[in-house]
Amino acid sequence: MIRRAHPLAAALPALLGGLVLTFLWAGLPWWWTFPHADMTRTGHLVVGLLYFPQFFWGPLTVALAVSYWRRTRVRAGGVARSVLDR
């Protein structure tokens, strides 16, 4: 028999990790405003475009963690509402 883990055991670390990543990469959108003398204009654009998706990693992780927790949390009646229970 497979025993389910508590939804908070998965959602809480994901939520905290997403918040850490959000604060870690918060300054990335302003990377293009800083001068980089050792880069060409094309190199500056390529590096910026390649690293820019990292800015969205934290907020997307937070959104997925909250969505998972909302889908799998235990209701007042003690019954978990999950996609697998349908």
Image: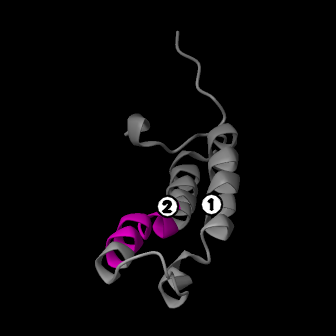
Q: CA distance from mark 1 to mark 2?
A: 7 Å
The residue that label 2 is drawn on is: 57
Q: Is residue 7 left or right of residue 59?
A: right
In the foreground, 62 or 2 = 62
> Can residue 13 be seen here?
yes
- State which tag comes first along the sequence, 1 or 2: 1
The single residue placed furthest to the bottom in the displayed view is: 33
Q: In the image, what residue occupies the spot 66% across and 65% down?
A: 24
The residue that label 1 is drawn on is: 21
Q: Amino acid at mark 2?
A: Trp
In the foreground, 32 or 76 = 32
Above or below, 18 against 46 in this view is: above
| Residues shaded magenta | 45-57
Residue 60 image offset from top left, x and y in percent = 48, 62
Identify the disc placed on residue 6. none
Q: In the image, what residue occupies the spot 61% across and 75% down?
A: 26
The single residue placed furthest to the top in the displayed view is: 1
Q: Amino acid at mark 1?
A: Leu
